[in-house]
Image (spheres, grey):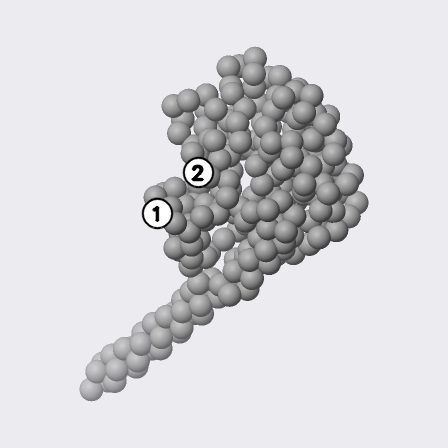
Amino acid sequence: MASSRWLRVAMSLTGAVTLLFLSAFEKQAAGKPDKMPWSELQRRYHGVFVLSATRETRKVALTFDDVPDPRYTPKVLDILKKKKVRATFFVVGSRTKKHPGLVKRIHREGHVIGNHSYFHPDFSKLPLGKMQEQIRRTETLLLNVVGFKPRLIRPPYGEILQDQVKWAKKERYTVVNWDVDSYDWKQLTGNKIYRNVTRTVRPGSVVLMHAGGGAGQNLSGTVDALPRIIDWLRNNGYELVTLTELLDVPEQHNLNIPLP
Ligand SMILES: [Zn+2]
């Protein structure tokens, strides 16, 4: 008798613990709807979510985020012009609104333009509709400034959810993060930035750098390191190309091209 009562108590306790565990699990799942490691996103959404290109050719793409910024973007553009390098710039809509001339210059000098949202929010904290608004508001502005909507998207902080990548796939965008972080956003010295890039770059790499910063953010290390990074890459047999050349996709957004 006693043992069966204890068994019932034990069973209902187990049930309660299981229920608690499940509800905690569901809460966690609801809080993070579908955050997925980058490598997994790249595997599942091949050609839509990209970290790097084929390792078979010695091509590398330098990418500069958070532009335009009158403090640093012109300096980076001057270096690229002098070194005859074409790069890729991920522009922020709200900054483009303030300095459209700088975005025009980026385009005029042969660089590729990508969409880096309007206000630079963390997409993984936004519902899909709000994320779409960030992309569309920026591309509508860019249509006025440079005459086209970009195909490339880089989410701020590289943060993006699976349903947002799914939407990008359906809409024929290409979402590009990076496999080499210069960590220049940590306001490092030129020497450290140079080392971060040259020690980790490989054929097909996408290199994250910045040509724009937040208020008070100092990117003079980037400006200092950039000429040396370019020289090192060339001396080591790398060809510097735009992201669209590296990935073989068009710069302009076009809904009519087939899915990858
Ligand atoms: Zn950014």
Question: Mark 1 vs mark 2: which is more N-terminal?
Answer: 2
Residue at screen point 42% across, 34% down: 248
Camera-side residue: 25 or 196?
Answer: 196
Other residues around mark 1 within 10 Å, as few (<14) / some (14–19) / many (≥20): few
Q: What residue type is labelled 2?
A: Val
Seen at 57% across and 37% down, the residue is: 112
Marks 1 and 2: CB-CB under 8 Å? Answer: no
Q: Quadrant of residue 78?
A: top right
The crowding category of the residue bearing disc 2, from other C-alpha atoms within 10 Å (few below 14, some 14 to 19, many at least 20), is: some
Residue 55: x percent and y percent? 40, 26
The x, y position of residue 233, in whole percent, is 56, 19
Which quadrant would the N terminus be assigned to in this image?
A: bottom left
* Quadrant of the frame with the C terminus: top left
State the residue in front, 100 or 225: 100
The residue singled out by tag 1 in the image is: 259
Q: Which mark is residue 249?
A: 2
Give the structural element (helix, strand or loop) at label 1: loop
- Answer with left or right where residue 1 lies relative to residue 180: left
Position above or below: 186 against 234: below
The answer, for residue 162, to whether it is visible in the render is no
Q: Position of residue 94 (x, y in %)?
A: 69, 54
Residue located 39% across and 49% down the image: 256
- Tell me which amino acid carries mark 1: Leu
Q: Is residue 15 above or below residue 204?
A: below
Q: Quadrant of the rendered structure where residue 170 is? A: bottom left
